Amino acid sequence: MRMSDELFNSVFLAKLEQLHLLSRKIFRGQHHAERRSRQMGSSLEFADYRTYTRGDDVRAIDWNIYARVERLFIKLFEEEQDLHVFLLIDASASMRWTNGSERRSKFDQARRIAASLGYIALANLDRVNALFFVNGLVDDLGFQRGRGRFHTLLHFLRQPLEPKGVTDLLESFTAFSQREKRRGLVVVLSDFLDTAGWEDALQRLRHQRFDVELVHVLDDEEITPTVSGDVRLDDIESGASMEITADPALLRAYRKTVQDFLDQLDAFALRFGIGLARTKTSEAFEDAVLRTLRTSGMVR
């Protein structure tokens, strides 16, 4: 059995069914209310009036008000709009890294979460596109809508794509924002390990008026390494290597560097009102996905 088949087996799909029901129970009525815009005509809910101007649809005139004040007013309604959901999945070499254990890679974890978010979005009749990126856009699914298109999304995520290449978030998000003119919710699933940094890349999405949500995927060994003694470190993306002595002082300095990295991303997300969910490869599926749902724009 291929790893992709193990990722999306019948047990996983059964959990998605439960997740869909749970998300509807927890979040019923919340994300619909945030996606309304005023339109003229008959729609979901009356919102307000405005003065009639030439060219307006006369069918929207409120004749009862005209009978009272002899002025023409147009009824305004709130109409729910389709939400365009973009799942941007990091497929760079660092995403395939594991510490040699039986845990899934960061790429596998990201794909499972992307499948879960896509499933719920499709079940709620949102329009969903999934895209892989490295130092630009690698591949994309194209928009899907409706629960019946979930298996198309799943087939796309199952493809035997080997994460490779050097991460370039700014180049990837620039290419995406230049190509995609439809605004919507962008969920970035990545380890955000880019030597050039991540802030300018995320600002590019914000400046293009996308709603941005982040799913930060890390391996436990990256956060709290268990190595000790003399070891050689190989950069999985650049190929550079160095020999170090992993003594307690060096490990403390490393953990502080990692914590600073996490704190900076947290502070950025808080400052700009961006949802941020962090998950480790060892984390159970239900815990990772449910926390992601609670911080993603699709269900808040």
Image (cartoon, rainbow, N blue to C red):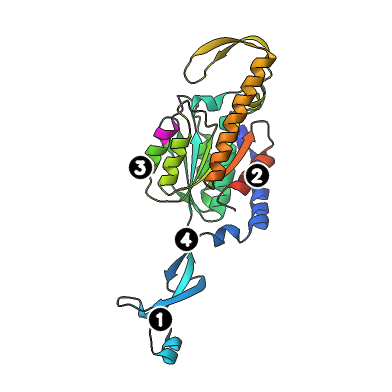
Q: Earlier in the sequence, mark 2 or mark 4?
A: 4
**Is the residue 44 above or below the residue 85 in the image?**
below
Q: Residues within 10 Å of mark 2 (few under 14, many from 20)?
A: some
Under tag 2, what secondary structure?
helix
Disc 3 residue type (three-letter):
Gln
Q: Earlier in the sequence, mark 2 or mark 3?
A: 3
Q: Residues within 10 Å of mark 3 (few under 14, many from 20)?
A: few
The magenta stretch spans residue 171 = yes
The magenta stretch spans residue 50 = no
Q: Earlier in the sequence, mark 3 or mark 1?
A: 1
Disc 1 residue type (three-letter):
Phe
**Is the residue 187 above or below the residue 7 in the image?**
below
User: What is the spatial separation of the Cα atoms under label 3 and label 1, in whole angstroms?
Assistant: 41 Å
- Counting from the top left corner in percent of width and height, residue 235 is at 52, 17
Q: Nearer the viewer, residue 266 or 232?
A: 266
* Residue 291, numbered circle: 2
Q: Nearer the viewer, mark 4 or mark 1?
A: 1
Q: Which residues are magenta?
A: 166-172
Tell me whether the residue at label 4 lies in contact with that at label 3, contact meaning CB atoms closer than 8 angstroms. Answer: no
User: What is the spatial separation of the Cα atoms under label 2 and label 1, in whole angstroms?
Assistant: 46 Å
Under tag 3, what secondary structure?
helix
User: What is the spatial separation of the Cα atoms under label 4 and label 1, in whole angstroms?
Assistant: 24 Å
In the image, what residue occupies the spot 66% across and 45% down?
Answer: 290
Residue 99 in view of the camera: no
* Residue 81, numbered circle: 4
